[in-house]
């Protein structure tokens, strides 16, 4: 009986650990740090890019509430609004000094793309098959100079509502 309890506790701890993951920062990392977080599921993403250039800023919406902008506004704006039960499963792109390109991909195969394709490639995704993007962190100075992603498994019935 005791062995069964110990094994159950170990399995529970292992499954809890696998439901959270972190994709380390890419980019030069100069400037001011940022963290974008909120309550509930991410329901929309907005980005700004220099005209024919790098990513200047990014903003996430949790439920019906937009986060503060990380970086800067101005230039070309791109936005994707997520459907109910749609969530972000991957962030890819290219970086040099700045985040040159960002592609945000959902579990439904839809994507938002901003910036220009030059620099070194990166690819971020959660460590669990059902993980979704929970928040972003990084640095900015004249644009986004780094980005890191934080992933978790959520059990939420629809966008903007919590159990």
Image (cartoon, rainbow, N blue to C red):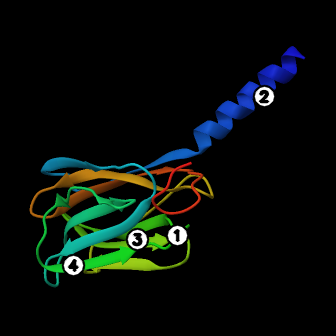
Distance between the alpha carbons at the discs numbered 2 and 4: 49 Å
Residue occupied by mark 1 = 84
Q: Is residue 83 left or right of residue 116?
A: right
Q: Residue furthest right?
A: 1
Q: What is the spatial separation of the Cα atoms under label 3 and label 4, in whole angstroms?
A: 14 Å
Dot 2: within a 10 Å radius of its alpha carbon, few (fewer than 14), some, or many (20 or more) residues?
few
Picture residue at 52% right of the left edge, 69% below the top: 84
Cα gap from disc 1 to disc 4, whole angstroms: 23 Å
Q: Which residue is under mark 4?
A: 77
The front one of 120 and 43 is 43
Residue at figure coordinates x 62%, y 37% from the top left: 16
Task: Write down the residue under mark 2.
Answer: 8
Q: Which residue is mark 3?
A: 104
Compare marks 1 and 4 and give the one earlier in the sequence: 4
Note whether residue 150 is visible: yes
> In this rendering, which labeled residue sits more in front, label 3 or label 1?
1
> Disc 2 on helix, strand or loop?
helix
């Amino acid at each position: 009986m005791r062995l069964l309890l110990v094994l159950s506790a170990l399995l529970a701890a292992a499954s809890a650990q696998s439901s959270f993951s972190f994709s380390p920062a890419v980019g030069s990392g100069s400037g001011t740090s940022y963290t974008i977080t909120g309550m509930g599921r991410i329901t929309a993403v907005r980005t700004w890019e220099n005209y024919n250039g790098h990513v200047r800023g990014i903003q996430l919406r949790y439920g019906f509430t937009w986060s503060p902008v990380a970086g800067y506004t101005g230039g070309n704006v791109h936005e994707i609004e997520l459907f109910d039960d749609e969530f972000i499963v991957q962030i890819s792109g290219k970086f040099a000094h700045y985040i040159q390109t960002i592609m945000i991909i959902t579990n439904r195969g839809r994507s938002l793309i901003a910036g220009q394709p030059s620099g070194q490639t990166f690819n971020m995704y959660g460590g669990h098959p059902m993980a979704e993007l929970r928040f972003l962190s990084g640095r900015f100075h004249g644009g986004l100079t780094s980005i890191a992603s934080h992933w978790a498994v959520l059990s939420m019935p629809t966008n903007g509502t919590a159990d």
